[in-house]
Image (tube, rainbow, N blue to C red):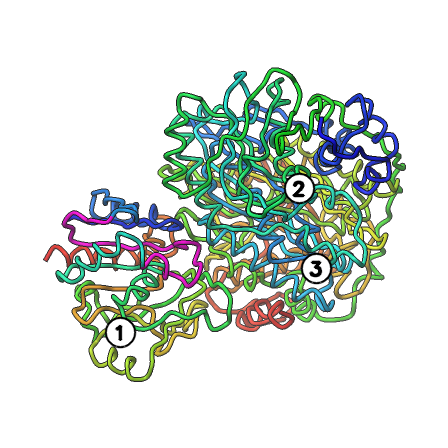
């Protein structure tokens, strides 16, 4: 053993470990740890790597299904899409780094999730993101929006993977803690998938990619603690991305995989060399010995602790077939990347690290993974929420003035300013890019396409986390359905505050339960995900934000629909009856923006109705009854219709119902409904009756560039478009 | 027809271009890695879009010094045809095979959108000779540094020589106008012999069948027709 000093509890506490955890670590090692050993334990046992507060609840989510090849626990989830092809996907957060250094934080978030996908043998084909910023007029917001947007773009654009969709929201609860969640989706041959479990005693362990520096040291631990006003002093812990090296690494790895040389592979993401070596060895039930003097470094005199905890980007660890080592070396030399054998797989079940000829670390592997702490944190019984009285919400303004306010607001206006900075066409398979319900990406060289979306409505989750958890799933489901694709599976990103506070834990437990119920009923298992807790600044938590990323499939992209409204079609609302199922204004954007009424019970989510309506829409698609479709969500019916008109450059003439208040009907946020444009209204009506799907005849799409309402109100499409498109630009 | 697509580290539209060429010609073009220093006789070299060498230093500056470039200079000197798209255009400018500079977009942001292009009726570009200059083309751009710039003298020289080939133009769509602040709305220029064309818009992303437009296919078809003649 080296003569490095052994640690005390104070050292452990500074790395975020509790007294019990510290005692456990010493027990597992059989002595006190040195700095490097303690660093490895604290990273592996951090909330970020161990899921210690959420594991108990994550286990309740459905993770199996007909299409599932790989559920949670690997780098990403995998589903079968037939014809020998698989979709590999995952979403992950990079919240704290993006607040401290928005450009690099967001860029490395994208880089990290891309590596998770190609590590498994997939060529990444699409990126999405889910972004939450502070109030739009908060002083830091424009800087953070610009930085995050260009950071996301810088990585995706350079590496050449289209960024095709996502969400952007603004709320004061994110003023001191923005959310940057990035999702990557790839395609692999289902018989050519690569996993991380090491095998073969004596097989070489290879380090490839960029060199290791002092950036991002202990980032996983930073992601597991609350923020405070001094957060910006943590800037040095933010990693720096290099998408060019990322591109070379991706091409080299995919080439190497095709050459049958890879036994196991893991990217060095959170907790860098620590988590990659520990997970590869532990999953294989083996040990690993690494000589840290061989690790390519870009700075002199790095300690064992720094090398193991660095989160420098664009690095991978592999176990390769010894007979293929030369081929592997040649491939990496072609791409001008480091390729360095740094150790061996052993049978000791221990992680042994050497540095300067001495042993720098010698610890058992099993406790790092299998004995990581797990907590059943206290939580409360949720309160029953009541609906805000409709009389307190509806204001005495015209429908059109309300529409003007809503579509021009930062909540609902066009996100073009953001998404035009992303290359959404590269790879030339983007059928539907940003701005629609789902993105639709052709599976290269086939007629199939996959539909992709990310969704969450934090203001619903805050008030009723159970409904909010369900609603995130059903909104994603509707977005997939609306383009004519069949929903298959989800990945989730659970962004919450400090789970040690019972009220935050309640949000987490309730939203997971809502997600569980929705995913079960809609047959969309959760195959991967990420948990980001401690999203608090100075003790104040964010609005809870359990994001759903959903993947669906359509057999022939030519049968897909968009939101673009064609002229001379009939407009039908499916899923609403114009009576009891219509007009839910409580906790709506209308209530927030026009009445300044925040909170109140969110719209109920009826899973059975969602499923029935979803199947009905797909049935209409397969019978060619639909010319365009859009789900109704934030802002309600009239906002959805406006988006369709702007996308299609056509107007509409609509009828108001007689037995319901026109504001609640136009702007209510009832779930499970869609606007559909059709040339076959009678057939849709007949089928709706047969299937007991409520519907309302809304009116006609017209070539005239205006919206005409039966009460005599008229507004030009030009004006609507102008308001819609300038919503963000006036702030940024 | 012998077509080669040159691949640099960081090129990311090489496959898209290959697919487009194969769709139109029925034949898969050769992919040539930048470390190669000689080139078998070809009719057309295509420099695809992407971020060669990560756009480090200046877009296209490092690629312009890759081993393959001397072979491309020889090909050009023999009167050979070259098409450079986006980063490929930047590389041709950095190699002095085309005039001018490409600066950062006016708004200092990456921009990805459809654009409407007009073919300059006065252009002497041999590669687009069969295109109808009365019809505009809808082809998307995706770049950070696409703002064409040249000093007054060079600008008037290339205008007078018919070396300005494509201009961003206005129509009634949301995609009208000059997206990046290019002088004289220039989107593409050619060499004085009309056989080397550089353009910022991506024709391989406007190939019909799922793309918003098929005008890129029309443009590429014209290039391939020109090299057969």
Q: What is the crowding at mark 1: few (fewer than 14 residues within 10 Å), some, or many (at least 20)? A: many
Asked if residue B42 lies in the magenta stretch, the reply is yes
Q: Circle 2 sits on which residue?
A: A306
Residue B218 position (above or below residue A27): below
Asked if residue A134 lies in the magenta stretch, the reply is no
Q: Nearer the viewer, mark 1 or mark 2?
A: 2
Residue A637 position (above or below residue A118): below
Q: Do circles 3 and 1 both sit on a common chain? A: no
Secondary structure under tag 2 reads helix
Report the Cα–Cα distance between label 1 and label 2: 55 Å
Instruction: Return the x and y of residue A417 as percentages of the image width and height.
Output: 56, 64
Query: Does any portion of residue A163 appear in the rendered image?
Result: no
Q: Circle 3 sits on which residue?
A: A170
What numbered label is drawn on residue B164?
1
Q: What is the crowding at mark 3: few (fewer than 14 residues within 10 Å), some, or many (at least 20)? A: some
Q: Residue furthest left?
A: B229
Image side of residue A462 versus residue B157, left or right: right
**Chain under disc 3:** A
Secondary structure under tag 1 reads strand
Residue A135 position (above or below residue A519): below
Give the extent of the magenta segment. B37-64
**Residue drawn at point x = 73 percent, y = 31 percent:** A37
| Of the pair A195 and A677, the residue shown nearer to us | A195
């Amino acid at each position: 053993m080296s003569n490095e000093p052994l640690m005390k509890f104070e050292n452990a506490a500074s790395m975020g470990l509790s007294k019990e955890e510290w005692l456990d670590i010493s027990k597992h090692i059989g002595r006190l740890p040195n700095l490097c050993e303690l660093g490895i334990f604290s990273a592996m046992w951090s909330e970020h790597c161990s899921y210690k507060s959420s594991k108990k609840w994550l286990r309740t989510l459905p993770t199996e299904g007909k299409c599932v090849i790989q559920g949670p626990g690997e780098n990403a989830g995998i589903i079968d899409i037939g014809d020998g092809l698989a979709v590999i996907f995952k979403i992950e957060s990079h919240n704290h780094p993006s607040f401290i250094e928005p450009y690099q934080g967001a860029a490395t978030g994208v880089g990290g999730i891309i590596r998770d996908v190609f590590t498994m043998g997939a060529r990444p084909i699409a990126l999405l993101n889910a972004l939450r910023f502070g109030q739009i007029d908060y002083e830091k917001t424009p800087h953070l929006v610009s930085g995050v947007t260009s950071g996301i773009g810088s990585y995706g654009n350079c590496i050449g993977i289209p960024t095709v969709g996502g969400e952007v929201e603004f709320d004061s609860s994110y003023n001191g803690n923005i959310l940057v969640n990035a999702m990557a989706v790839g395609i692999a041959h289902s018989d050519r998938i690569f996993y991380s479990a090491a095998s073969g005693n004596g097989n070489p362990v290879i380090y490839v990619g960029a060199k290791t520096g002092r950036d991002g040291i202990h980032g996983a631990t930073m992601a597991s603690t609350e923020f405070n006003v001094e957060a910006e002093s943590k800037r040095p812990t933010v990693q720096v991305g290099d998408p060019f090296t990322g591109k070379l690494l991706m091409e080299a790895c995919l080439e190497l995989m095709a050459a049958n040389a890879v036994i196991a592979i893991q990217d060095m993401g959170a907790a860098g060399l620590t988590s990659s070596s520990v997970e590869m060895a532990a999953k294989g039930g083996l040990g690993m010995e690494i000589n840290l003097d061989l690790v390519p470094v870009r700075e002199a005199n790095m300690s064992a602790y720094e090398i193991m905890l660095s989160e420098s980007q664009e690095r991978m660890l592999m176990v390769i077939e010894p007979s293929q080592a030369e081929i592997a070396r040649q491939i990496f030399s072609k791409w001008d990347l480091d390729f360095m054998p740094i150790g061996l797989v052993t049978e000791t079940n221990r992680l042994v690290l050497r540095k300067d000829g001495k042993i720098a670390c010698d610890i058992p592997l099993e406790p790092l993974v299998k004995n990581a702490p797990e907590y059943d944190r206290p939580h409360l019984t949720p309160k029953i929420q009541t609906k805000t009285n409709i009389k307190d919400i509806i204001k005495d303004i015209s429908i059109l003035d309300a529409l003007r306010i809503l579509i021009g607001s930062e909540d609902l206006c066009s996100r073009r300013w953001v998404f035009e900075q992303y290359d959404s066409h590269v790879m030339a398979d983007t059928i539907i890019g940003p701005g629609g319900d789902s993105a639709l990406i052709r599976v290269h060289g086939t007629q199939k396409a996959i539909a992709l979306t990310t969704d969450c409505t934090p203001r619903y989750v805050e008030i009723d986390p159970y409904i909010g958890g369900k609603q995130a799933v059903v909104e994603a489901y509707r977005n997939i359905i609306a383009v004519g694709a069949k929903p298959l599976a989800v990945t989730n990103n659970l962004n919450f505050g400090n789970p040690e506070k019972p009220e935050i834990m309640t949000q987490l437990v309730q939203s997971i339960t809502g997600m569980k119920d929705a995913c079960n009923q809609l047959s969309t298992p959760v195959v991967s995900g990420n948990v980001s807790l401690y999203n608090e600044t100075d003790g104040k938590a964010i609005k809870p934000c359990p994001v759903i990323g959903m993947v669906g499939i359509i057999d022939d992209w030519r049968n897909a629909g968009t939101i673009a409204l064609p002229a001379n079609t009939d407009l039908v609302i499916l899923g609403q009856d114009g009576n009891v199922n219509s007009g839910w204004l409580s906790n709506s954007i209308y209530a927030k923006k026009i009445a300044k009424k925040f909170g109140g019970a969110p719209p109920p989510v009826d899973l059975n109705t969602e499923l029935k309506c979803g199947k009905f829409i797909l049935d209409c698609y397969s019978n060619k009854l639909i010319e365009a479709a859009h789900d109704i969500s934030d802002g309600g019916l009239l906002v959805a219709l406006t988006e369709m008109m702007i996308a299609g450059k056509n107007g509409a003439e609509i009828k108001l119902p007689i037995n319901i208040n026109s504001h609640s009907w136009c702007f209510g946020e009832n779930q499970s409904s869609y606007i559909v444009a059709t040339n076959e209204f009678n057939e849709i009506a007949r089928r709706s009756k047969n299937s007991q799907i409520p519907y309302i005849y809304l009116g006609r799409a017209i070539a005239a560039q205006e919206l005409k309402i039966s009460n005599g109100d008229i507004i030009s499409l030009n004006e609507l478009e102008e308001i819609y498109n300038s919503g963000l630009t006036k702030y940024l | 027809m012998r077509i080669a697509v040159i691949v640099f580290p960081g090129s990311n539209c090489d496959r898209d271009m290959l697919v487009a060429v194969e769709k139109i010609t029925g034949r898969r073009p050769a992919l040539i890695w930048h470390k190669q220093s000689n080139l078998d006789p070809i009719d057309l070299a295509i420099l695809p879009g992407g971020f060669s060498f990560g756009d480090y230093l200046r877009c296209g500056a490092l690629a312009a010094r890759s081993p393959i470039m001397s072979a491309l200079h020889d090909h050009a000197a023999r009167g050979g045809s070259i098409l450079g798209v986006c980063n490929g255009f930047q590389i041709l400018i950095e190699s002095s095979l085309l005039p001018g500079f490409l600066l950062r977009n006016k708004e200092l942001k990456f921009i990805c959108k459809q654009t409407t292009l007009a073919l300059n009726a006065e252009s002497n570009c041999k590669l687009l000779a069969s295109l109808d200059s009365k019809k505009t083309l809808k082809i998307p751009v995706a770049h950070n540094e696409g703002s064409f710039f040249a000093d007054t003298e060079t600008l008037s020289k290339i205008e007078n020589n018919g070396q300005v080939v494509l201009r961003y133009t206005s129509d009634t769509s949301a995609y009208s106008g000059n997206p990046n602040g290019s002088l004289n709305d220039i989107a593409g220029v050619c060499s004085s012999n009309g056989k080397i064309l550089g353009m910022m818009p991506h024709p391989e992303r406007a190939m019909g069948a799922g793309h918003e437009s098929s005008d890129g296919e029309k443009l590429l078809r014209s290039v391939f027709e020109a090299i057969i003649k």
